[in-house]
Every structure is written in C-alpha cells, then in structure tokens.
Image (cartoon, helix red, strand yellow):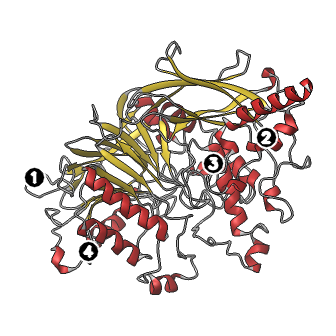
Amino acid sequence: MKQTTGILLFATGALAFYAGNINYFSPSLHHPSLGISIPKVAARTYESLPWKPEQLNFTHGVASGDPYDDSVILWTRAAPTMDNDHSNTTVSGTTGLFSHETEEFVMFSKSKVCVDWKIARDEKFEKVADEGRVWTSSDIDFTVKVEAKRLSPFTTYYYQFNICDSDKNSPVGRTKTLPARGKKVPSDIKLAVYSCSNYPQGFFNMFGNTVRKDSVDFVVFLGDYIYEYQNGQYGWGDALGRIPQPDRVTYTLYDYRKRIATYRTDLDLVANHMKFPWIQVWDDHEVADNTWRDGSSFLRNNEDSFISDGAVSTDSRKANAVRAYFEWMPIRQVDMDDGLRIWRDFKFGDLFDLIMLDTRQYDRSITNLYDNTGYIKDISNDTSCSLMGPRQEAWFYRTLKQSSKRGTKNLPYNYDAWDGYVANRNRTFATLYENSITNNIMLAGDTHASWASDLVWLDAPTELGEYDPITGRGAIGVEFAVSAVTSPSPLGQNITMEETETDTNLLKSFNKELQWTDLYYRGYCELSIGYDGVSARFYGSPDIRTRNGFEVSLANFTVKDGENRLQRYGEEMVASVDGKVEFGSLQRGRTVTTNLTYDTEEKKWFVFEEQ
C-alpha cells in the first residue's frame, strides 16, 4: 500500500510539472484534442531519468509575449539537439492528432527535460517576483512556455531559465508588463511594428536595429513570420547561407517546427525576442499562400490538389502549422470557440486598446487564388463575404464600441486588402461612423509597402459628409502600413529606386486619401502613443544582403488626439512633419533623397553608397 501511494503521489507531482508548461495544452481551450495527453507523457517518462544537464542546451534563446498588466508569457527551448522532433503522425489518417505513442516517430520521448525559471525586477535576480519548475519533452519539441504572474503594471522585468540542479542557464531576457487597465499611463508608449520576414531574401537587420537603439517598449508583429516555400520559390538563400530548412514546401508538423527553428537562428530576430515582449498574429504564410477558411492557393481539398501538394488535407496542414506556431511563439491560449482563434485585444491603461485581428485563417470567405480573380470581383459586395467571419466581426464591432465608451484610442490591425470584401469593409466603416468611434489608427502589413493615409469611407452615404483630401476633414482615423522586414517589393525583388517612382506617383494620384507611400525600402515603423496624439516614424534598410545595423529615416507623421486625420503642415497642407520625405511619393510635398543613413551599431551617421 505504501508503494502504491508513493507512485500516486509521484504521478500527481509529475502532472503538475508538465501542466505548468502551457505548450502541452491545446491552442484552443475548447478543443483539448489538439493538445498533448499529459497523463500519457507522464506514464511514458516517469521510470526514465531526465536528460543530463551536459546533454542539453538552450538552442534558440528566450522570448516573451502577450503581456498583461499583471502577467506575461515566457518562452525557451531546452533540447539535446538543434534538430526538431520528427513526428509526422498528423498526416496519417489512422493516427490520432499529435499522437506521440509510436516509437517510430519519436526518438527522445522516454526522457524528460527539467527546467526552472524565474523573473525579477533586477538583472541580478535579487528581487524575484515569480518562479517555478516545469518539464518538457520531445512531444512539444522540447519547448517551454510559462505564464509569469504576480507582476506589477508597466514595469520592466528580467527573466531566465535554468536546467534543473545545474549551472546551465539560458540568456537573460527582458520584458515589460502593460499599464494598469483603466489607469493613467505615466509616459508615452512606444511600439515597433513589423511584418513579413523572409529568411532566404536577406538578413533581419530591422529586428536588430530597435534592439541596438533600445527605442521601444513593445513589438507588434503583423504576420508572415515564416514562409512555407522551398528555397528558390520565393528567394534564393544560397549566396547568403540562408537556405530555409527543411528545403521543401512545408506540410508536416516537423516541417513547420523546423522552418520556425531555422528563422530563429537569425541573430537579430533572437535578440529582438530577448529584449522586447511581442504581440503578434499570423497572416497566410505561417500556413500557406493565400489561405482562407477552406483552402489556399495550391491546396484546395480536391483530388488533384491532394495528390500534387503533399498528400495532406487542408485541415491537417493547418493543424500542423498551428501546433508548431503555438509551441514556438510566446502567445497565450485565448478563450476560444474555435481551434484557430488568435484574435484578441490588449488594453494599455486608459490610453488605447490594441485589437489584433485574424483576416486569414479563422473564417475568411474564399479569396483570390490567382485563377478565380473575376469571380472574386463579382462576389466582393455579397453580404456573406467576410475577411473575418461573423463571430470575429461581431466581436470586433463590440470591442470597438466598448473601447470608445472608455474614451481610449483604437489600434485595430487589418493586414489584408479589403477590395474583395466590400460588404465587410462597409460594415466596419458603418460601425465607426454611425457610433462616432474616433481616434482610430489602423495598422496594416502583408503588402510589402509603406504608406500613411487618412482612413476614409469613400463611398459612404451622402449624409456623412464629403472627405476633403487637402485638410483631411471627413476622415474617421488614420492608416499606417509597414513594409516588410525582408520580403520583396510588390514591384519585384530587383526593382530600382527610379523604377518605383512611376508606380508610387500613380498610387498617389488614384487614391486621394493616400498621403504618402514607398514601394522601395524594406523596413518598419515606430509609433509613440500619448494622450496628445500619435507620432509615426518610418525606417528603411539600405542593405538586407549583408548583416548590418544601417537604417534610413524615411518619413515622419503626426496624428493629434481627436482629429482623426494626419496632421497637415505649412501653406501646402503637407502631411509629413517637415513637408518632405526621404523617399516615396508625398501628396503636395517634396521627396528629397540624401541616402543619409544611421548606423545603429556604431551610433553614427553616414551617406550610404550601394556597392
């Protein structure tokens, strides 16, 4: 009887150590089958000794994300190998989702990894706020994800992981909590906004620049963290030593784990994750090109598609991608009613609400798949066509109204073209205009282009009044779009500055609300958000083919509190702060290209000359 009691007690303790690692759970609270069976993992490993500390390494740094005012998610990977778990059972019709009970697929599953973690107000960890011990295993690719709790609002913290009972430590990470919900924010909040990082196209220098400048509080990533292509299909990485692994199109769980892990070998991306808490969503390429609810450009759940594209169904491929994403990203479970829900919001005191939308994977109606463009145009104004799906739409409009009642600014993120979903677009504008929801800043990515625009319902009912593009009167907010970290210009990979001028001028002439756009530079945007308004600074990289800390200041814009438009300056009513931009096309203003470049590593300015 004593022996049995001891086993029961051990089993109970084991379950607790596994349960402390969020990655064993399903990405969806309402779909537990997408998680890993902790009792089975515990039963398989309890007789085996853990991996020895000398066999283990923290292979991909540390990361933090999804901050609240009293907690934050912490992440690392403690593994006996740089490689990833080879389980591909999710593509077999006879095996349960994410079953790791077959030795054929799991090499290391009989031994666990024990990891301690702690978070403190100081780098010496003399003022520890929270700590714990968790286990990980090959079932979740040796990843560790925990929620650090009992934290103070708007406070900087330092965190570290340790292989249990050893001196093998992870790098020290830094993170920050949100301001207290509903309370005054003591200082402006600074965000770095990124989108579209393509590994074989170039180095992720833009991630490193904010680290070297230490210029922001939080990072917002708008999707396309990875690309699913084989080397050469969307960028050749050979010359740069950046061939995406595995070197094939991604379909299986192993494929997606390995692809994310490959991206996480970029030192600037690792440094950015280590320095700042991330708030992120996916776009399409985290799964496949042009995904929608029931398929993608080349995988459409028909026989030809199944045979030619990996012999995997759309749902299985999505499940593989989502499981790997959830394991490797510092994101929370959301109180989901669907296994793919990632849409959520973050409240920054009483200053603003950040609303993160999913306009790709959740419930998007059929999209442009390259061979159905005419059909998409024909149905674009159909009431049932939606970027978000009815549940997310209802949640979005409800969240906007609640935010407006609280008197905060709104930062919704929509990263995809509305042209194919006119009815959804009009419902969104109607919600904003009819409920007088003001102080809206829309963030956009995916297009690989930068722009600053008044947010306008151009085909609004006449009673709402005319839009004046000179003053901005009639707008309901502002839209800022960020370029890509490395993904190529929408005009092509090898486009020159001179060749982009014609297209940017055409865009400006066809879109009167568009105050500035640039199609040349790969880059990002920094936002400073305060009670007086929002300022936006756009930066571009003059060279992504080498690893460097260079950046060019492209354009600066201001939005004053309550004015719902880009601030105009001077007699010409130019939207940019000083009446000019470094590059791109500016309504009524000047483009003065100097190539003046700041080296964030050497902390000095110079004129960049392309070799």
Label 1 or label 2, whichever lies nearer to me, is: 2
Question: Label 3 neighbourhood size at 10 Å, few (<14), some (14-19), many (20+)?
Answer: many
- In the rendered structure, find residue 326 and report the number of the disc placed on it: 3
| Disc 4 residue type (three-letter) | Leu
Placement of 370 over or under 90, stated as above or below: below
Which of 54 and 496 lies nearest the eye of the viewer?
54
- In the rendered structure, find residue 138 and report the number of the disc placed on it: 2
- N-terminal label among 1 and 3: 3
Separation of marks 2 and 4 at Cα, in angstroms: 53 Å
Q: Secondary structure at mark 1?
A: loop
Separation of marks 4 and 3 at Cα, in angstroms: 39 Å
| Disc 3 residue type (three-letter) | Phe
Which of 145 and 42 lies nearest the eye of the viewer?
42
Horizontal and vertical percent position of residue 196: 51, 53
Separation of marks 1 and 2 at Cα, in angstroms: 62 Å
The residue that label 1 is drawn on is 570
Q: What residue is at 43 percent from the left and 75 percent from the top?
A: 421
The residue that label 4 is drawn on is 458
Q: How many marks?
A: 4
**Whether residue 400 can be seen here:** yes
